[in-house]
Amino acid sequence: MRIVVTGGAGFIGSHLCEFFIEKENDVICIDNLITGSLSNIKSIRDNPRFTFINHDVSRFISIKGDLDWILHFASPASPIDYLKYPIQTLKVGALGTHNTLGLTMAKKAKYLLASTSEVYGDPLISPQRESYLGNVNTIGPRGVYDEAKRFAEAITMAYHRYHSVNTRIVRIFNTYGERMRMDDGRVVPNFICQALRGESLTVYGDGEQTRSFCYISDLIQGIWRVMQVEDYEPVNIGNPKEITIIQFAERINEMVGNKCGIVFKPLPEDDPRVRQPDIKRARIIFSWMPEVRLEDGLRKTIEYFKNKVYHNKD
């Protein structure tokens, strides 16, 4: 196959590019590198099946030749990024999705949208199932990301219904692993890097808010399974095992051997109190469930960040 991955130099996108290259597909990675990094794709950069294009998909996209799949993963994805780049986040969710769908139509390809658990906002039900319509503050600081992805889902479904585009929508829950940025601002790199530096771990709010963590290899397998089945409804991909932030901080400190404990800071506006996917659809329709235990995934991730913190290696 010949596959386009937008945001392909990012955390998830680079793992997808690598996965498709290993399956002997031709991959075109499009990224403007505002949050992605060329270091993420260094292992495949010289592969003859791989092409990198430095381009903002919020502008018109032109690619020669046939395409089989377009996977739209371009977007700032952590609060620190989409608060820094609010307009770019809205544009890539709206214009970027429009442009990639237009390219999909022109090439008669198939399309997969990387959506997010953030479409549920600060949910009033738990776990969150795909039929839940969400509880989103449209004008809050996090709204730029939440609404960009909600619009992206809406226009993807419009292209599916009115132009018969073959689409998929994956709602990605908290994912972690190698190639996350140290300054990502999300809880996994924050806690691991603080622990490795011998610092107190910063917990926002009372720490009783919950998250669930899916290792990157499980996510990639989930996306691959979704691509194999003709089903256009949104599907949650994430690990349903819920843990409080306090429990997660204590586990990181224990695994790293950090004795500095925890400090508390005020909870950011609209930070969700619960986040847990209902993965019944993924399990039944796509035969997917996460397999990597949290402790095993964290060991690999901690080793990755050791090189970053101690040796400053890419």
Image (cartoon, rainbow, N blue to C red):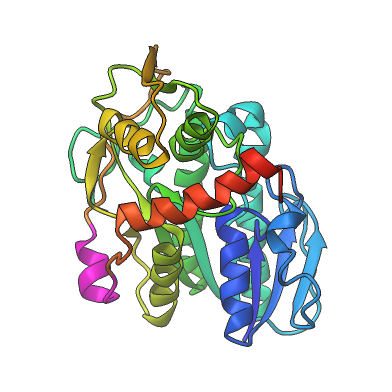
Q: Position of residue 20 (x, y in %)?
A: 59, 78
Name above or below for residue 225 compared with residue 264.
Answer: below
Residue in the picture at 46% in, 37% down: 146
Name above or below for residue 229 compared with residue 309.
Answer: below
Q: Position of residue 44 (x, y in %)?
A: 72, 72
Q: Nearer the viewer, residue 102 or 12?
A: 12
| Tag count | 0
Image check: 39 left or right of 209?
Answer: right
Name above or below for residue 78 compared with residue 209.
Answer: below
Q: Position of residue 117 (x, y in %)?
A: 37, 46
Residue in the picture at 36% in, 58% down: 296
Residue in the picture at 20% in, 32% down: 124
Q: Is residue 111 visible?
A: yes
Prevailing SS of the magenta stretch: helix
Q: Nearer the viewer, residue 243 or 79?
A: 243
Q: Nearer the viewer, residue 194 or 34?
A: 194
Q: Position of residue 229 (x, y in %)?
A: 36, 80
Residue in the picture at 23% in, 70% down: 283
Q: Is residue 108 visible?
A: no
Image check: 287 left or right of 76?
Answer: left
The quadrant the N terminus occupies is bottom right
Quarter where residue 107 is shown:
bottom right
> Residue 75 in magenta?
no
Start-end of magenta stretch: 279-288
